[in-house]
Image (cartoon, grey):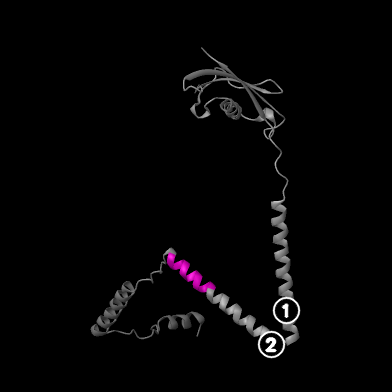
Amino acid sequence: MSDDEQFGRNSQRPSETSPEVTLSDADKARIRAEEEYRAQMRAQVAPPTPVLLTKKQEQAATKAQTSMDVAEMNRKNLERRAALTPKQRRTENLRAVAVLAVLILGLAFLFRSCSTAAPAAPLPLSEISRGTVTTLCEESAQERLKVPSSAQFVAGQYEPYFDGTKWMYVGGVNAENSFGAAIRNQFLCTVTGETYNDARAITNLIPLP
């Protein structure tokens, strides 16, 4: 038999396929109901909602955790010291005392350094303010009045002036004399010195008509 004849016979054989499984209507309905039930259950199951803590609750939780950590450290330290010999414990205590003494001495030295810092240099006479010069001159003029408590100062026509070595100021003051009468006065003031600390005001009163 030729190859072509053999191929023709093989091609005429019915195809061998696995038998098709046929489900009954009841089985199909049962499967469909199960799939619908699973879909409903998946839709109802929501993801877990994260728990949001308030700031106060977070602080309380952090404090509680810190307390637990400290307690655990203390417990481990007690266990460690219990395992030491008496000599080792004494050595450890001496080291702790030495460290504490060094810290105390360091703080004392720092405090002493701050307290003994060099004082600031006195303010030169040329750098004091015009308001300060006016106050010094008015105080000096008030001391020369018969009734100092009755002084009523009048602003000068010109501001205090520094000529390179001293301040000069001309102002006015109304005050009572020894008889209780109101007197108008003009005063000429000179402020001398090297710094504000040794500044000295010299005032001359001139009664006005």
Is residue 21 within the magenta segment? no
- Give coordinates of residue 94: x percent, y percent: 74, 77
Query: What residue does disc 2 label?
Result: 83
User: Vertical placement of 195 versus 50: above or below?
Assistant: above
Q: Secondary structure at mark 2?
A: loop
Q: Quadrant of residue 200?
A: top right
Question: How many angstroms separate mark 2 from mark 1 (CA)?
Answer: 13 Å
- Give coordinates of residue 128: x percent, y percent: 64, 30
Magenta residues (range):
56-66
User: Vertical placement of 54 versus 70: above or below?
Assistant: above
> Residue 40 — which label?
none
- Give coordinates of residue 71: x percent, y percent: 56, 78
> Residue 92 — which label?
1
- Left or right: residue 43 versus residue 166 is left
Q: Residue at x 54, y 18 (%)?
A: 185
Label 2 or label 1, whichever lies nearer to me, is: 1
Q: Secondary structure at mark 1?
A: helix
Sequence-first tag of 2 and 1: 2
Which one is in front, 85 or 189? 189
- Give coordinates of residue 27: x percent, y percent: 27, 84
Is most of the magenta stretch helix, strand or loop? helix
Is residue 61 within the magenta segment? yes
Q: Residue at x 53, y 76 (%)?
A: 68
- Left or right: residue 75 versus residue 125 is left
